[in-house]
Amino acid sequence: MYSQELTDNNMLRYTRQLVLDGFGPEGQNKLKMAKVLIVGAGGLGSPASIYLAAAGVGTIGIVDYDTVSYSNLNRQIAYSTEDIGRYKTDCSEKQLTRLNPDIEIIKHSLKLSADNVREILVAYDVIIDATDNFPTRYLVSDTAYFLKKPVIEGAVAGYDGILMTIIPDKTPCYRCLYPTPPEDIALNSTEETGVLGMLPGIIGTMQALEAVKLIIGIGQTVSGRIITFDAISSSFRDISWKRRKDCPLCGKK
Ligand SMILES: [Zn+2]
């Protein structure tokens, strides 16, 4: 399955990770063959996509229909001032290809909906949910559950960040935590809460780390637990989390 050889340049490019325990050429080839979808090319999706491209994930899909604006630039590090007004998918492709020309970037310059979500998600191995709104988050996590795809959830609001990895039928799902979307739909929008760029930088980078560990099969992912990060006190919390028997999605029907 992982038969594609690494070129000499690739051996040099990835040399610092190739020497890691549990990594090696086999791990690198797993990354090369992997397809990761990033939903949302904003404050979380920017660092996630950059680190996954740098690590050599062979196919990175990016879903976003938005264009770059000035108010994005304090945290969306995939973009520059010259990108204002351009599609984030186009700018991400340019930036990630410059960083690593050996990988494929697939642009999905559209708004995810019930009509298109399944055909997009089905082509990928791992989904990174880097959205900024609850309707899309539920759409992605519900669809991924039915397609049996792992989802790495990340979110930020104000000075608070949260991270969890959901593996269908093995770990709690998103609806085990929040059975129905919160009434205050704006709760998840940085437009309302504000955000300092480093916070999505930290959480988005951790989402990329989760993806790499899932693909290679090393270490423990943040599944069956939730990690929260408080940027004001610079403290992490690790909270265990169980499946809900009456979960509307993964519970006993
Ligand atoms: Zn559930």
Image (cartoon, rainbow, N blue to C red):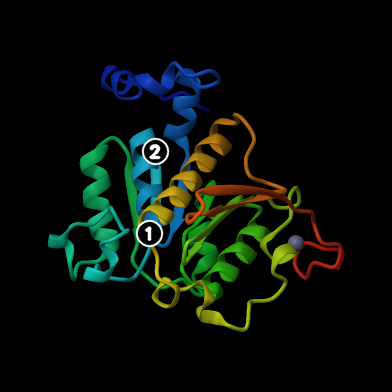
Crowding near pointer 1: few (<14 within 10 Å), some, many (20+)? many
Residue lying farthest to the front in this orientation: 233
Q: Nearer the viewer, residue 51 or 64?
A: 51
Name the residue tied to disc 2: 58
The tag earlier along the polypeptide, 1 or 2, is 1
Secondary element under disc 2, as helix, strand or loop, is: loop
Where does the image place residue 200, in percent across and percent down from the top left?
A: 42, 56
Instruction: Tell me which residue sits at (44%, 48%) in the image.
Output: 202
Q: Is residue 253 left or right of residue 184?
A: right
What's the amino acid at mark 2?
Answer: Gly
Q: Image quarter for residue 7?
A: top left
Residue drawn where x is 50% and y is 49% of the image:
234
Name the residue at 21% across, 69% down: 70
Q: Is residue 114 visible?
A: no
Q: State which quadrant residue 194 falls in.
A: bottom left
Give the SS element for disc 1: loop
Cβ–Cβ under 8 Å for marks 1 and 2:
no
Up/down of 46 relative to 27, above or below: below
Q: Is residue 20 above or below residue 204?
A: above
Which residue type does callout 1 highlight? Gly
Can I make out residue 81 in this image? yes
Query: Which residue is labeled 1 in the image?
Result: 43
Q: Residues within 10 Å of mark 2 (few under 14, many from 20)?
A: many
**Which residue is found at the position 35% from the left and 19% from the top?**
15
Residue 94 image offset from top left, x and y in percent = 21, 51
